[in-house]
Image (cartoon, rainbow, N blue to C red):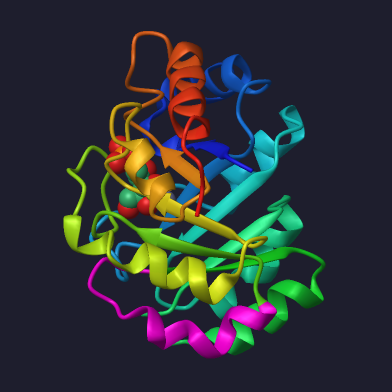
Amino acid sequence: MIKIAPSLLAANVARLGEEVKRIESYADMLHVDVMDGHFVPNISFGVPVVAGLRKALDLCFDVHLMITHPLQYIEKFANAGADIITVHIESPDDTAECVRLIKSLGKKAGVALNPDTSPQRLAHLVGGIDMVLQMTVFPGFGGQSMEEQALGNLPVLREMLGKDKDLQVDGGIYADNCAELVRLGANVIVSGTGIFGQPDPVDAIVKLKNNASAVVQP
Ligand code: DX5
Ligand code: ZN
């Protein structure tokens, strides 16, 4: 099933609540980028933003942790209302331990990989996780162009995951390039600039969903 995940990073911070309310009934989940200024060279949202928005919204909260020590923060984001928590395989913390902690808190677990990371690095984890996040840009900033080198990983990851688990893609995705990603095996489309950066974010979600859904998935 195709799912569209608008990325909060591209929303107008002066009106975060209103911006998300506007797309709430069209989106399948809200993608929240957490950056610590260390794992990636940027700082974004933290626990209070997730907790505050969660109270006002019914959406599934998909929290993408781009932080050096996810183990220290997983429980805090779970308590704040995250439904899916994704950690990077490149972080120095033990990813298997992160996944066990996320699952023990009753949340869905995702593992993310950068465009230049081999999918083989997470092969031992796929049995215990709900989602893989293939970064289609190097993490840290919205509005970047897609890294073609990431695309070759998608069929490999889909094969590893089987048909039913989610394969998410994130970075540089718009209505006019999402179909190729679905053709390669992705089914969860994150888009920031492609949704909140458009004149009509609802229309952008509908277009992303239509274009992605028109593809017969592998
Ligand atoms: C990048 C973040 C993305 C970002 C995508 O590090 O993980 O979620 O918000 O933004 P766009 O869609 O603008 O590339
Ligand atoms: Zn993200």
Please tell me whether residue 53 is drawn above or below residue 48 in the rendered image.
above
Q: Would you say residue 104 is visible in this rendering?
A: yes
Left or right of 96, for residue 35: left
Residue drawn 62% across the image and 39% down it: 29
Query: Which residues lie in the magenta part?
Result: 113-128
Q: The N terminus lies in which quarter of the figure?
A: top right
Number of marks in picture: 0
Please tell me whether residue 213 is drawn above or below residue 87 in the rendered image.
above
Q: Where's residue 172, x and y in %?
A: 27, 41
> Which of these two is toward me, 188 or 5?
188
Please tell me whether residue 129 is drawn above or below residue 193 in the rendered image.
below
Quarter of the view holding residue 134: bottom left
Please tell me whether residue 101 is drawn above or below residue 15 in the rendered image.
below
Residue drawn 31% across the image and 81% down it: 118
Quarter of the view holding residue 204: top left
Left or right of 138, for residue 63: right
> Which of these two is toward me, 102 or 174?
174
> Which of these two is toward me, 69 or 1?
1
Q: Where's residue 99, x and y in %?
A: 64, 79
Residue drawn 53% across the image and 48% down it: 187
Quarter of the view holding residue 49: top right
Residue drawn 53% across the image and 84% down it: 95
Ligand 1 is in which quadrant of the figure?
Answer: top left
Q: Would you say residue 43 is visible in this rendering?
A: no
- Magenta: predominant secondary structure element? helix
Q: Where's residue 44, x and y in %?
A: 39, 48
Q: Does the magenta stretch include residue 207?
A: no
Q: Where's residue 209, x and y in %?
A: 51, 27
Left or right of 4, for residue 113: left
